[in-house]
Amino acid sequence: MTLTDGLLPTRGESLSRATAVLRAAGVEAPHVDAALLLAHSLGVDRVAILTHPETPLLPDAAARFFELVKRRAGREPLPYLTGRALFLDFSASVNRSVLIPRPETELLVEETAARIEPDPRLIVDVGTGSGVVAIGLARRYPMARVIAIDISESALQVARQNVRDLGVEERVQLLHGDLLTALDLSYHYRVSVIVSNPPYIPSGDIPTLQPEVARYEPRVALDGGVDGREIIQRLAAQAADWLAPGGLLAFEVGFGQAAAAKALLRKTGYVNVDTAADLSGIERVVFGRAGS
């Protein structure tokens, strides 16, 4: 944005220009994203942007803003640009080491909470990423111990910050490891709940995903192998050795994967296998209980 007749551009003018740039780049909600980026650049909320469009935009703020607009036009996800993502009733830090939390994962937490006893003793979140699933369950069950595991050390750094910032550091333990191999052997057949948003995208499908996902989100958190079920199969087999009798295994799946996942759980010996669907009627979460 350049000066016109010696005047600084207003917030409204800058917002209009940024919206046009993002629209041309194919961004799904260009005006919303532009407003959020402008608010982030200025350190104010979005309402202040929309209610005072006549306010001049100072050069330093304009430079910050249009650098972010350039990156968003390159399809870098908005939460990575602002460093924040909303999940359930809280906001969490995110960066390119972790997946951006989505409504499907909120469904995972809500439907898991609807199926477990009022006072679970030990909850394990596998592939915790930013830690939002572990934090969401820890906030709902203040008497429970929660263990959050991830294979990525950089993801655990993000989770550690969120656990600290959201006040559950005393009750959420973070472990580095591959699936459940990080657990202490004393927990065999003692875990109340194992919950996971595992990698479930077939390897060959990743390049076809939205640019925001394919280019920027961590592949280790997306790639579920040739058929998308490699990690789910390993998780189901391992979880059977850790869940207490009647303990719950809950995990997110991709579109069209629920039927195969249910069959896998039944074959592995789980009982009371069922699913939860999202608002579009797509089965997105699969559940099974360890047998007695």
Image (tube, rainbow, N blue to C red):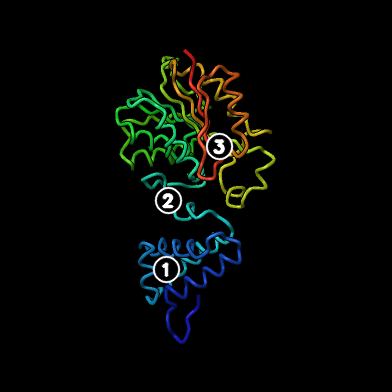
Q: CA distance from mark 1 to mark 2?
A: 19 Å
Residue to which mark 3 is pinned: 283
Residue occupying the point 50% across, 28% down: 287
Q: Residue furthest front?
A: 281
Residue to which mark 2 is pinned: 84
Q: Position of residue 245 (x, y in %)?
A: 44, 15
Circle 1: element type: helix
Figure check: 104 above or below 56: above
Identified by mark 1, the residue type is: Ala
Q: Position of residue 198 (x, y in %)?
A: 54, 34
Identified by mark 2, the residue type is: Arg
Ranked by sequence position, the earlier of labels 3 and 1 is 1
| For discs 2 and 3, the disc positioned in front in the rendered view | 3
In this orientation, which residue lies closer to the viewer: 154 or 134? Answer: 134
Ranked by sequence position, the earlier of labels 1 and 2 is 1
Circle 3: element type: strand
Horizontally, is 33 left or right of 58 in the view? right
In this orientation, which residue lies closer to the viewer: 69 or 63? Answer: 69
Residue to which mark 1 is pinned: 61
